[in-house]
Amino acid sequence: MTAPSLEVEGLAFAYPDGHQALFGVDLVVQRGERVAVLGPNGAGKTTLVLHLNGVLSGGRGSVQVAGLPVVKENLREVRRRVGIVFQDPDDQLFMPTVGEDVAFGPANLGLRGDELQARVDRALDLVGMREFADRAPGHLSGGQRRRVAVATVLAMEPEVLVLDEPSSNLDPTARRELAEILLALDTTIVMVTHDLPYALQLCPRSVVLDGGVIVADGSTRDLLCDEQLMSAHRLELPYGFDPVSAGRSTR
Amino acid sequence: MGVGHGSGLHLPGTSLLHRLPPECKLLAVFAFVLLVVATPREQFWAFGVFALVLVAVARVGRVPLGLLARRLVIEVPFVLFAVLLPFVARGERVDVLGLSLSESGLLAAFNILAKATLGATATILLATTTDVRGLLRGLERLRLPRSFVAILSFMVRYADVVAGEMQRMRIARASRGYDPKHLLQARALAASAGALFLRAYERGERVYLAMVSRGWSGAMPVLDERRATGREWVTALVLPAAAALVSASAWVAQS
């Protein structure tokens, strides 16, 4: 049996200023699963994400990525295995051109020459942005930038793809295009989002994080239909959206 | 290279000058400027020859002379001081068009003007025929510390982002009726500058997180390892070689 993609156990963390963000999070994500992490602002979602690749650490509990513990000695490999796509693509795309940016991660892993180029081409193909390799990130649209940000992470061939608010600032078309790209990947996906319909469309399973603990874990549709749970954790469906029928009749 | 990613100064092209590796051009321009500065100012003819050399370089790079002249305007604020020199300097006076001017001041003004103009022209030629990325690569291959190059490249990447934020703040101020008429109202501007600095600082932290998350460990990876050939170096060094000849002749004439 292969180890789960992600195994978070009893994770607790307080920031240096004393603010405690996580109070013992347990979460197991199997290989190939797509899981949405839902929760109100300040629930600890981003703190959890930053633990997955060891950017934050030092609290109690443990994180394992495909069986590998997230500890200092393993950070290099952990960061290859966990690819985080941050919320603002301008933060993620810091190199002068799209191609160089996608190459940044694999080059840090030691790839060079043709092998590196092949990685970059493949990642850009996955998000349909190959012909933009020579462009500057600043000259792309929001949706294109988001797709390139996904490619920068895919180029590292991660075990888990972690997306922080992937649909924010996207127009409906770009949002749908990104969904199609993500659905076509066979990577394990953990997606932090406020966009509940998006969670329903992309992730069969969801967990609700509030007050630094996981308060619910189940099928996304069941969670979204549980009105009591939803209102208790400041989760609200957009006007007119019915999670019971959404996505069923139109197929 | 595709369109749409040039900087404001780069004029895309395929001339010999465009194709030369950036590190050769950087070094050639730097050496040229040093040689111009080292030439004795009394030898007026030498500066004419330097100018002719640059015109020839511009022809090779197919850079229109009009464009070059327009870009030279950037030099104006820096040489304003030189124009004042003939009026304020001491020493023997000469009469020009009824004005009594200092002879040493005139010479100093000519010195500054001529050398600044030649240096600026050479630099503009470099910027016109090399894109920003190329310049950064060139600096890197000339062994400028990688962190410096990385800082420069971040500056290039984020200048537009920060300018965009600044623009949005300006619009937000204007939308709320901010229309400063006297100095006391500048407070909001100062607050905006502070906010802008904080935002840039926070972005820096987020970019750092994104870099660390993709396996960055202190050194930027070298992505392009092509080295300039001996022939390319020789081609580029024609410029400083010509300048060295002129400068040397000027010194001989001087003594």
Image: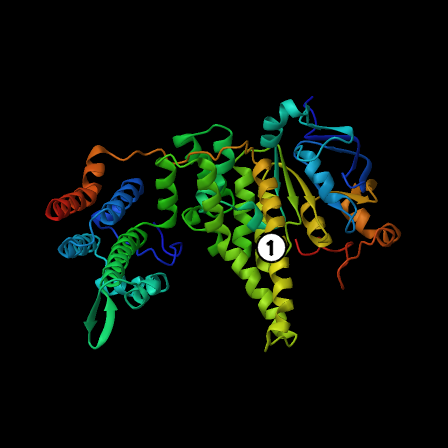
Q: Amino acid at mark 1?
A: Phe
Decide: few, some or many residues near mark 1? Use Cα within 10 Å; few <14, some 14-19, many ≥20: few
Q: Is residue B100 above or below residue B141?
A: below
Location of residue A19 in the rendering, given as x and y in whole percent from the top left corner: 81, 42
- Residue bearing mark 1: B197
B80 vs A68, nearest the viewer: B80
Residue B82 shown left or right of residue B177 in the figure: left
Residue A159 shown left or right of residue B105 in the figure: right
B155 vs B157, nearest the viewer: B155
Residue A204 shown left or right of residue B183 in the figure: right
Residue A4 shown left or right of residue B71 in the figure: right
Location of residue A64 in the rendering, given as x and y in whole percent from the top left corner: 70, 27
Location of residue A224 in the rendering, given as x and y in whole percent from the top left corner: 80, 51
Question: Which chain's residue wears label 1?
Answer: B
Q: Which quarter of the rendering shows the C terminus of chain B?
A: top left
Location of residue A7 in the rendering, given as x and y in whole percent from the top left corner: 73, 29
B13 vs A33, nearest the viewer: B13
Q: Residue at x 24, y 75 (%)?
A: B99
Q: In which quadrant of the rendered view does residue B49 lie?
A: bottom left
Q: Residue at x 47, y 48 (%)?
A: A129
